Image (spheres, coloured by chain):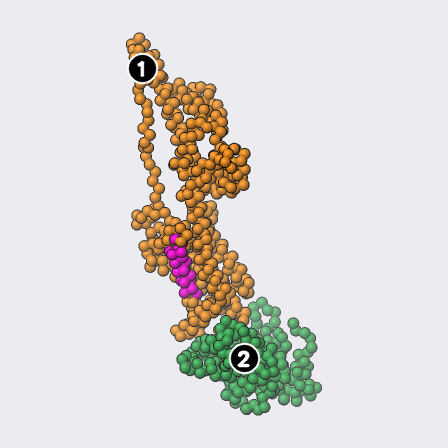
Amino acid sequence: MAPETSPPCSETPILAADNIVKQYPGAAVRALDGLTLGVAEGEIYGLLGPNGAGKTTAVSIMSTLMAPTAGQLTVLGDNALQKRSRIRRHIGLAPQEIALYEALSARENLSYFGRMYGLKGAALQERVAACLDAVGLTPQADQRVGVFSGGMKRRANLAAAIIHAPRLLFLDEPTVGVDAQSRALIMDLLTGLKGDGTAMVYTTHTMEEAEALCDTVAIMDAGRIIVEGPPAHLIADHPEADSLGGLFLQLTGRTLRD
Amino acid sequence: MDRMLASVMKEWRLLTRDRAGLLMLFLMPSLLVIVVSVVQMNVLKTMGDDPVAMLWVDRDQGEIARMLRDGLETAAGVIPMDQWGGRPLDEATALERVSEGDYQVCLVIPPGFSQAVVARSAAAATAMLAGPEPPPAANAVLPEIVVHFDPLAGGAFRSAVSQALQRLLAGIETRLKLAAFAERLPEHMAAALTEIMGPYASDGLRDKLSETPLEWDARPLMILTERSARRGGVAQIPSAVQQNVPAWGLFGIFFIAVPLSGAIVRERSSGIMTRLQLLPVSFMTLLTGKLLAYVVVCLAQFTLVMLIGRFVMPLFGAAPLTLGQAPGAVVVVLLCVALAATGFGILLGVVTRTYEQASMIGAISVVIAAAIGGVMVPVFAMPRIMRDISQVSPMAWGLDAFLDLFARGGGFATVWLQAVMLLCFGLVMLLTAWIVFARQRR
């Protein structure tokens, strides 16, 4: 479900990637070939592309998990390649996998990750409770994640990504396999985070979701950004495409990638 | 510190909620100690402490067969069984019972054995007194008794029985030869003196020599005493419990590599590792948290196994475990072993790609390390090449140190080298894991 209103994003740059190149050892082609993008405070940046386009590599590098072969990365004004430990406390990641301990309850998972971010005592408990409430898991807070439904796990996964109130949040297909109710809750939550100034990089294969949620989308293929801009502008600039999905297929083709 | 504590608490929660894993970690070494110790207690008894039943087919019914039987019963702790189904045991039945494994040993004494041996001893004495040229009788076929073993009887058992028989036969042979010699010596001396002295030899000389007593003193000239060489001068043969508690406790500790590596692989495949990598803490902090949690498990495991050795094994008739004279050194070695095992588990978790790989490689490598490390078969009983190979197994270092402390009366001065080697092994494992992990992130 699309949010009704999107607060305007600030122009303060949170993330700036400049000509990022990634060549894996032994690979014939570059996984990223001169990726350049910027994400401002309160902006939701949609990264779209077929499988193998380089989205996961781009997220890994921009979230400081992986070092690029070449290029510059700036997060919150700092060189992210040199001050990884310092900026990581401001980065959140909701990977596509359910990156939670299934034998622990939702509360225990959030408490653990919260403590690892330096939260403790009453502040930790309040933050855990707030995050559980934000994803609608307060009644199930003390149940083990292993017994959760797919949608509940996905929401808990998102809660763990925001436990430390990050200023830059990476979301890798956060709505895969969830029902309409969970999808709506997640959309509302992300809109709320946007309103709080959180910058987000959002990868998805659901074009409608990107069109509705993202301030800016970039369509990638073969490690490069083909087009970038607000969804409405991109569609307007390509009259032959009646939607973001149509534009995506037009630019990346119909050939299967895997 | 709070982060490390959080990490330890998390690992503890995960461990305590994995009931199957806990059962494996705590139940397996406990059962192994109990079962193997009880089994080995019985094996040891079969080879010495308890009487051995020997099927006895005496077709001779002579004096030597009787002497041999008496000697076996009194000196070697053997129970000869010459009846089967209420009837005298015949050779065919005895061999059938042994070949089917109902009994492990059978002795067959052929007819005329005693008579033949006495004749040979007489001939031997005569030959000795006659000079360098032996009479033809001394070259005749030797009288033979045959001992039959169950094909599955172990080498040590065969050796023990054979040696007992050889010892008794040698004693009987000596006695027979001396008796024959003593019987013939007076007559031989009289003849020789008569020949030398000629007409000066009196008629009473032969009678006088015949009356000379040639009875041998049956008391032994020397004795062999068996003792266990142990530091501190305390003579005590290590029991099966004393050997099995450290051996299988060590095996259990190293088996922790299986759940530990599996947990790391699961973290990686589930994406948790990605989230952990993004935390503003070092990999070493995360690793140390995991390490501490599992080291505590190792300590708990070994403590449990020691308690079983101390309080449960006596219920099975075994002597209780004693910790030796240096409990502090036991703790130090235990910590080093725990570090080595958890280091190995962490490296395994980092280098393997799937849970199946980790558990398979982990289990096989631990079993192999245990086998070459002397957990299953003592190192001294291995072929030379395996004894050399065993020196590369950390389990051999740990076991050697524990046996030094538990059974040989050693202290820290005698086990410090093994402790350092285990410590270095653990650190090398952790360092390698860290390097491999860092490379994987490039």
Residue A174, quarter of picture: bottom right
Residue B224, quarter of picture: top left
- Residue type marked 1: Asp
Determine the chain carrying the residue at label 2: A
Residue drawn 52% across and 39% down?
B98
Where is residue B148? Give x, y as percent: 50, 36
Left or right placement of residue A31 versus residue B382 in this view = right
Q: Residues within 10 Å of mark 2 (few under 14, many from 20)?
A: many
- Residue type marked 2: Arg
Where is residue B259? Give x, y as percent: 49, 64
Left or right placement of residue B242 versus residue A37 in this view = left
Majority secondary structure in the magenta region: helix
The reply to whether callout 1 and callout 2 are in contact (CB within 8 Å) is: no
Left or right placement of residue B428 versus residue B189 in this view = right
State which region is magenta: B294-314
Q: Which mark is residue B207?
A: 1
* Helix, strand or loop under label 2: helix
Determine the chain carrying the residue at label 1: B
Query: In front here: B257 or B240?
Result: B240
Residue B118 magenta: no
Q: Which chain is green?
A: A
Q: Which chain is orange?
A: B
